[in-house]
Image: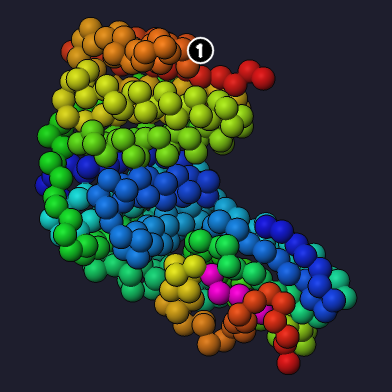
Amino acid sequence: MYESLPNVRLQLASTPENVVLVREMLSGLAETLTVGESDLNDIRTAVTEACNNVVLHAYEGDLGLMEIEVHVTSGGVRALVRDHGCGIQARPEGTDPYPPGIGLHVIHTLAHSLELKETVGGGTEVCVAFAIPGISALEPCSDERELPSLALARTPSTTTLSIAPIVLARSVLPRLVSTLAARAHFSTDRISDTQLLVDALVAHVQGALSGSQLKVEVDVEPRKIELHIAPLTLGRAQQLIGDSELDGLGRVIEKLTDRRHIATFGAYESLTLGLTDSR
Amino acid sequence: MDVRLGPDRVVLGLHGELDLLGAPLLEEEIEKVEAGTLSIVVLDLQDLQFVDSAGLRVILTAHERSRRQGKELALTPGSEQVQRLFTIAGVSEHLRIIDSADELLV
């Protein structure tokens, strides 16, 4: 539908917990873009309703992929919520007892424009646009490579964030990873470690990136998180670890992680960072 | 969520976000409270920052149940986002909004 690649793409399983993550992503974006509270409320509410529709109706009780894309344009924000499920269908009587269709009504009221379409191959896209005076368009993502999944296997507990420009990652990635660390039942101290780690990562990753887009896959298990970071220029993953050195603390990425692994994918590298909370 | 007993009411204090994830927990808690003897339930929304249609459904369903049972369900105002959703959904005038959780109900 739209020519330019999104500034943010979030891919995650269609669960109620993950709708919370979507809101965290939007709050992080708003922080960098200095979107006012009232506009942020409207965006969070409308996108939540679109995501809730995916969770409740797209996969008929099963889990499936939920994709959220955000484009920052001149004078506004455009958000797209996509599923690959059963498409737009009339719901049987009695499934929305009170009041029926309120989610779409809320979206329609809050957004400047709303577009629904069925996607090729099955599924639905809900596209909502918000007019926010004063916002400047961000440099569009120019990296059109479809990077393969970095984790060994994509599971329902995998969250993938693709983001450009990097300045957005500074407020979005820490929020997402902290929320996921809490979900992994990390202690408060270990959640703080995770935040420090992500702060160090986003502070230095731009110089290591191959291209303009950062892709981070996060896998969560009880007391364990893995971050897979790509695409990095060949040889730069190790340099990224070295760049994270702080006076008195050493290499933050090394100090705060339990596992580090560099993998090569043809013309680029990925860096995997594993953290556990082994209390 | 916290639960407080008053002389004539039960006050459920909601915090943070009431959404698709948390709505079933509120529903469960309201049903427990309804099984008791007090005829007034107050949802204290002063610390509620966000609500979605799933959360709103729980509130409206509880309101309808209390009306049918001759009981009272009242709410204190929530954040700007909460009040805005109530307005958009057209339910503000149907719900009993009180200034504070301990306000006398006539």
Tell me: residue B75, above or below residue A273: below
Magenta segment boundaries in residue numbering? B74-78
Q: Is residue A42 left or right of residue A33?
A: right
> What amino acid does circle 1 point to?
Asp
State the image quarter where residue B47 is shown. Answer: bottom right
Q: Position of residue A177 (x, y in %)?
A: 44, 33
Q: Position of residue B61 (x, y in %)?
A: 64, 74
In the current view of this chain or complex, which residue is farthest to the right?
B37
Q: Is residue A30 left or right of residue B53?
A: left
At 71% across and 66% down in the image, what residue appears? B12
Crowding near the residue tagged with mark 1, few <14, some 14–19, many ≥20 C-alpha atoms within 10 Å:
some
Residue A38 in magenta?
Answer: no
| Residue at mark 1 | A258
Q: Is residue A102 left or right of residue A118?
A: right
Tell me: residue B71, above or below residue B21: below
Label 1: chain letter: A
Q: Position of residue A14 (x, y in %)?
A: 47, 46
At 46% across and 57% down in the image, what residue appears? A52
